[in-house]
Amino acid sequence: MTYPFISPPNAGRFALCNATLPAAATVGFDAPAVEGLIKADIVITNGVISALLPAGGTPAEFARSDLKEGMVWPCFADMHTHLDKGHIWPRNANADGTFMGALEAVRTDREANWSAADVWKRMEFSLRSAYAHGTSLIRTHLDSLAPQHRISFEVFAEMREAWKDRIALQAVALFPMENMADAAFFADLVAVVREKGGLIGGVTRMTADLDSQLDVLFRAAADNGLDVDLHVDETDDPAAETLKAIAEAVLRNRFEGQVTAGHCCSLARQDEEAAKRTVELVAKAGISIVSLPMCNMYLQDRYPGRTPRWRGITLFKELAAAGVATAVASDNTRDPFYAYGDLDPVEVFREAVRILHLDHPLDTAARIVTTSPADILGRSDMGRIAVGAPADLVLFSARRWSEFLSRPQSDRVVLRRGKVIDRSLPDYRELDSVVGA
């Protein structure tokens, strides 16, 4: 059995002493940094961070826990998930692990099984897992082909209310953009999204109608005050350049809302000059990029009997260097698009560091699951350690990067408003009644 490595005091005011903090996720406190890690004492009063002090600087009369240089992170932001798809693998697996196999398996399962009760059960299971791991902010994409858009957005709205004190939730309508040709469907979808306070999304494809589709999408978003979050170029085909078309459409339509593009895999398959031009356009258009490294490594360049030749990821470093807001996220969880995962941002971070080579140095790496996704989601009040912020923190026994990245950190302690939460993960057997064993 795994036990927490520390039990903070149950007091109205206490200090977490001799802590190691990621500087990239710490606001308003300066200290010497080693590989982006700083030392501090964190004083918590009535569930709020009331002071950040030099390590060892807490007054003697305060209740305290000595972390012995263990890390303290803010709670995580997971900005691209699919809570509606989660955990259907036992019911409809992806037979060959390919992208097309995933599309077909999900379509079959959705049409046969996605009632409100089914979506609720699986979504709640996922949220319980994410909460136990230390996540406080999630954006999910919801499959939104008719009539599923009305079912899933209703469930989501109820779930958002039920979880509002634990995880802040956002939802994006996911649908093939060619379906906008059905004007009645698209008008209804936009109405549902607007009513439920969501975002408009979609899957872009290289077609003769792409530019006009994007114009329709951005006009609808502007007219209804909606931000946009798209699935983009999730392919190894270098001819897939919908990211470039999206950036041009943002500029052409003078769209002022937030635009996020996920995946953008084919960018890494293009020649240097073409990719550079697209990166510059993305920066000019103010588009944010989220990479999904675990799912993209799973799906991309998968062919029978052939070892994959590339990692399936976008040009993360080049985009960040150009000033583009970048982050990573979980994506799919135990469904045909990704057979594994548990909505654990520590796993996502650990794998992202390895897959994207975000190490050597690791100085600012912590931002990709904390401040950066929180800012992209319009929640700059979350994903950071700061005086006046809620004491929503994740405590680790690991002191340095090598320790943090070498183990899954199963003994972490999660504080919400300064109180230790129950980190028990839900048992998969709870889902047997809906997805089978």
Image: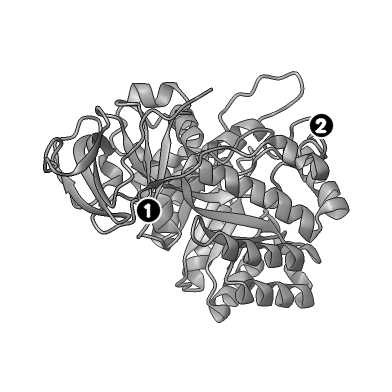
Which residue in the protein does label 1 denote? 417
Q: Is residue 252 above or below residue 60?
A: below
42, above or below 183, in the image: above
- Eyeballing the image, is 138 above or below 4? below
Q: Amino acid at mark 2?
A: Ala
Q: Quadrant of the N terminus?
A: top right
Give the class, few, some or many, for how many residues have Cα within 10 Å of label 1's Cα (few <14, many ≥20).
Answer: some
Q: Which residue is mark 2?
A: 95
Question: Could you say whether the residue bearing mark 2 is in a helix, strand or loop?
Answer: loop
Q: Visible in this render: residue 319?
A: no
Instruction: From the viewer's perspective, tell me whether residue 127 is left or right of residue 104.
Output: left
Q: Position of residue 145 (x, y in %)?
A: 77, 62
* Amino acid type at mark 1: Arg
Q: Residue at x 30, y 26 (%)?
A: 399
Question: Which marked residue is nearer to the observer: mark 1 or mark 2?
Answer: 1
Q: Residue furthest right?
A: 112
| Whole-percent x, y for residue 22 in the image | 29, 39
Quadrant where the C terminus lies? top right
Asked whether 66 or 326 is in front, the reply is 66
Among the 4 quarters of the image, the one containing residue 214: bottom right
* Quarter of the image where one finds residue 89: top right
- Which residue does the image show at 41% across and 25% down from the upper left? 405
- Say left or right for 296 vs 355: right
Instruction: From the viewer's side, name the closer residue of 47 and 154.
Output: 47
At 63% from the left edge and 77% from the top edge, which residue is drawn? 195
